[in-house]
Structures are given as C-alpha cells and as structure tokens.
Amino acid sequence: VEGGVFEMGSLYCEEEQNNSDWCNDESPHKVEVDSFWIDKYEVTNAQYRKCFLAGVCEPEVLHEDRPRDFDQKSQPVVFTTWKEALTFCKWREGRLPTEAEWEYAAKVEKLGGAHWNQPYGVGSPGPVGSFEPNSLGLYDLMGNVYEWTMDWYGAYGEVEMQKNPLGPVKGKNKVVRGGSWDSLGHYLRTSDRVAKDPDLRYSGVGFRCIKPN
C-alpha cells in the first residue's frame, strides 16, 4: 500500500445518528501514513495452526472444544486475544496495523467486502475472500470478522494533522475495525471504531498483519 495523506474519521455520527456520546470518537482529521505491506486476507485457522505447531502461538485458540462452525481451515481465526494476534504477526516478522493504517487501506474508491450486503445472523464467519476485494485487492476489510489494531481506544477530539499516529499511550480497551458476521449494516463502515478488552476472546474478532515498507 503506497503511503499518502487522507481524511481519517467521518461525519456519519453527527449527520445520521446524532449521538453525542460517541460522535467525538470519529472526528474527521488529516493523517499521513508511510507505505506498508498488508495481508491480502484475514489470518486463517490453517495459518494460525502453523504458528501453534511451531511452538509460538497459544494452543487455547485451537482447543477441541472450539465450535465446529468456527473451525474450518479457510475461515478467519477468531477467539484470539490481542496479544496472541500480535504474537502471530511478530512470528511472521510483522505487526498488527495501526488504526490509521487499517483505515487508509480500507477507505478506497471500491470498498469491497460485505459493506452494506453483510448477511446478518449467519452464525459464523465465512471463508476468507468470500466477498469482492476492494480497490487495493484486499479482502474482507468490511465484514466477516472485526480485526484487532495496535491502538488503545480513545476519542479523536480536536486533532491536527498527524503522521503515522499511534493512538493513546495507554488505555483499557483496544480498537477493532471492519465489522463482523454478526454486525448490523451501520457498523460496516471504514471509520467505525469499536472498543474491545484485549485480554478477552471474541467469536467475531480476528486480525491481519502488516509489514512496514
């Protein structure tokens, strides 16, 4: 993904939802990001299993009690904590994307993914790449599963032009992006932000990795 400047955030909340409790969390602002490589697909169960067999990743994610609806090789791996996701990416000599990097890769002319066509209530994520790719050839940034990012959750507030922002230095929750198989349509937006406890496991949260260019 070639770096550049873009407007991060959205006026969707103010214009459509009129919800002052979280409107500040999406305040539009200019951001510059450097070039980076990003996974074409969300990390799959099969890929995560290789990390487990290498003795690096945690076995709990692949426990035999895991629901079968989430255990297909081509499905995105879920039930990973934030730390486990980061461990996998480091094993691949990468890391999780920052919020800015994730949104920059997602906010393109052709969004791809489920977007407003997410089949609600299907019960589990589909195989990666089930929907059309976006303009950059990336799959499932919109829908299928939320994706962990590096950033702690915090409101944008009044912010000036930033380069490669890293978010708050500390916090309680990490940011996930992109919507999930159990998300309503208005969550399938490039600017939508959701806070999740980094120590918990979720059936609707997976991840993909990046490498700085």
Image (tube, rainbow, N blue to C red):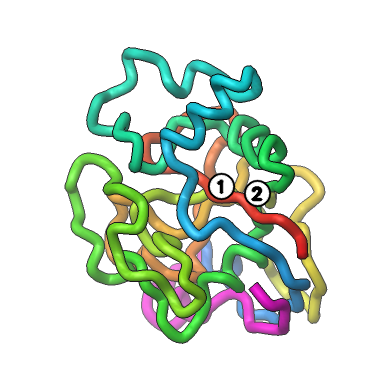
Q: Residues within 10 Å of mark 1 (few under 14, many from 20)?
A: many
Q: Which residue is mark 2?
A: 96
- Residues at marks 2 and 1 touching, judged by CB atoms closer than 8 Å: yes
In this rendering, position of residue 50 left or right of residue 187: right
Rendered position, 195 above or below 8? above
Residue 36: give x, y in percent of width and height. 71, 66
- Residue sitting nearer the eye, 8 or 108: 108
Tell me which corner region of the image, top left, top right, bottom left or bottom right, holds residue 77.
Answer: top left
- Residue sitting nearer the eye, 142 or 171: 142
Q: Residues within 10 Å of mark 2 (few under 14, many from 20)?
A: many
Tell me which corner region of the image, top left, top right, bottom left or bottom right, holds residue 124.
Answer: top left
Identity of the amino acid at label 2?
Answer: Leu
* Residue 148, numbered label: 1
- Residue sitting nearer the eye, 9 or 49: 49
| SS class, disc 1 | strand
Identity of the amino acid at label 1?
Answer: Trp
Is residue 3 part of the magenta span, yes or no? yes
Residue at point 62% right, 76% down? 8
User: Distance of mark 2 from mark 1, alpha carbons?
Assistant: 7 Å
Residue 84: give x, y in percent of width and height. 60, 30
* Magenta highlight range: 1-21
Q: The C terminus is located in which quarter? A: bottom right
Q: Nearer the viewer, mark 2 or mark 1?
A: 2
Q: Residue furthest top?
A: 64
Labels 2 and 1: the sequence-earlier one: 2
| SS class, disc 2 | loop
